Image (cartoon, rainbow, N blue to C red):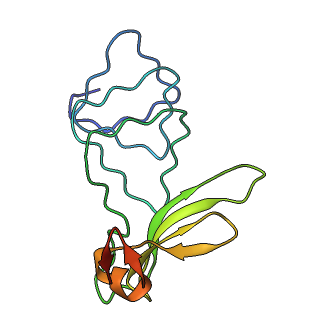
Amino acid sequence: VATNSNVTFNNVSVDGTLTSDDITSTNISVAGNATITGNLIVQGTTTTVNSTAVAIGDNIMVLNKDEAGTPSANAGIEIERGTATNVSFLWNETNDNWTVSNGTATSVVLTAANFAATFTGTLDGGTF
């Protein structure tokens, strides 16, 4: 076999370190730890992380990244609560506001922009 030959093997085992700059496979399974020293790019429609702890160094997470035109999809965080109703903190694109839901009722989050329209009366001596 020459170094530039295309070779097919079944069930290759490596005892030591496998180094390559181009491994192509339909499926790859790692039974132990996998350390990736470069960037990890995942291309597909679903990425599932089955983990009890996730540590993210980035201070801004981008949701709904693929939106390219007029925004139409709500986005936010939903908490899975097992047998209890889920709760959420969502940006509502239709109404342009943040909402919180306890699983039963949904309320608009009070902001500086909607405060005067939402609150009437006296607060700390000021009238709105």
Q: Quadrant of residue 66?
A: bottom left
Quick one: 103 or 11, which is closer to the camera? 103
Quick one: 48 or 92, which is closer to the camera? 92
Q: List x then y, in percent, for residue 89.
A: 49, 64
What residue occupies the far top of the structure in this picture? 15
Q: List x then y, in percent, for residue 77.
A: 48, 60
Question: On the rendered structure, is 115 left or right of 50?
Answer: left
- The structure residue drawn at horizontal position 31% and vertical position 61%, both measured from the top left corner, is 62
Q: Is 114 drawn above or below residue 87 in the view shown?
A: below
- The structure residue drawn at horizontal position 37% and vertical position 70%, both measured from the top left corner, is 64
- The structure residue drawn at horizontal position 49% and vertical position 20%, both measured from the top left corner, is 32
Q: Quadrant of residue 106?
A: bottom right
- The structure residue drawn at horizontal position 34% and vertical position 74%, both measured from the top left corner, is 111
Q: List x then y, in percent, for residue 40.
A: 29, 43
Q: Quadrant of the C terminus?
A: bottom left
Q: List x then y, in percent, for residue 112.
A: 29, 76
Q: Quadrant of residue 44?
A: bottom left
How many numbered discs, if any?
Answer: 0
Quick one: 18 or 100, which is closer to the camera? 100
Q: Quadrant of the N terminus?
A: top left
What residue occupies the far right of the structure in this picture? 83
Question: On the rendered structure, is 24 left or right of 73?
Answer: left
